[in-house]
Image (tube, grey):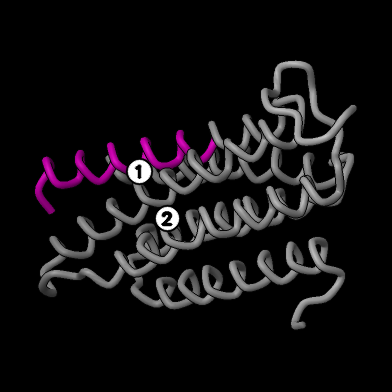
Amino acid sequence: MDTWIEALVALFLLIGSLFALIGAIGLYRLPDFFMRLHGPTKASTLGVGGMVIASLIYFSFRGEGVSLHELLIALFLFITAPVSAHMLAKAALQQKLRISEQTRGKPWEQ
Amino acid sequence: MLAYVIPLCLMIIGVALVLTMARLIIGPDLPDRILALDTLYINAIAMLVLLGIWLGSDLYFEAALLIAVMGFIGTVAVAKYLLRGDIIE
């Protein structure tokens, strides 16, 4: 395999895994649920997108023709991540979770 | 180059899985735990895709797609249960 292709695959792999790590750190460190919701729904989904692009490039240049079916995973995740985040936010509002001082918008009296 | 980068990426995603697992254990409320499970399956998909590149096998793609579909359905079902007290009304 060409060195440039390999470097491109390595770059996308590093970008993807770093975004996944950033999402997990956000999930671990942020103070309340409505802030924690931001990490996984944005950063981790983008991380999987980077991984999938790397896999697509790798399997396309291996000599068996263009391989596009990895895009299905990214497409499905990009459609479903906002839906599940919306359902989780609605469930959290229903449960009246504690919110920290910096969270803007107070749907109920603390 | 890939021989060095792929174990590094596996290590980074392993750290992400450990952090998510910690949130799953200490998470104070129920939606936190559901969110941690959601992140756990997304990171597992990333790890499976990475493993597929490492072993040069196309088979891991199907497993990743199945995990994506089933994980989404599970998250929506549990969130719906919290929201309504019932899954299918």
Q: What residue is shown at x 49% (from left), y 62% (from top)? A: A80
Q: Is residue B49 above or below residue B13?
A: below
The mark found on residue A13 in the picture is 1
- At label 1, the amino acid type is Leu
Q: Label 2: which residue?
A: B50
In the rendered image, is residue B4 in sight? no
- How many numbered marks have been drawn onto this rendered protein structure? 2
Residue B66: x %, y % from top left: 52, 76
- At label 2, the amino acid type is Leu
Residue A82 among magenta residues: no
The chain letter for the residue carrying disc 2 is B
Camera-side residue of A92 and B59:
A92
Camera-side residue of A79 and A54:
A79
Q: Is residue A93 left or right of residue B62?
A: right
Q: Quadrant of the N terminus of chain B?
A: top left
Camera-side residue of A20 and B47:
A20
Tag 1 and tag 2, C-beta contact below 8 Å:
yes
Write down the quadrant of residue B15 in the picture.
top right
The answer for how far apart the CA atoms under marks 1 and 2 are is 8 Å
The range drawn in magenta is A1-21
View extreme (top): residue = A101
In the rendered image, is residue A87 in sight? yes
Residue A14: x %, y % from top left: 37, 37
> How packed is label 2: few (under 14 Cα within 10 Å), some, or many (20 or more)?
many
Camera-side residue of A93 and B8:
A93
> How packed is label 1: few (under 14 Cα within 10 Å), some, or many (20 or more)?
many
**Mark 1, secondary structure of its residue:** helix
Q: Quadrant of the C terminus of chain B?
A: bottom right
Residue A19 among magenta residues: yes
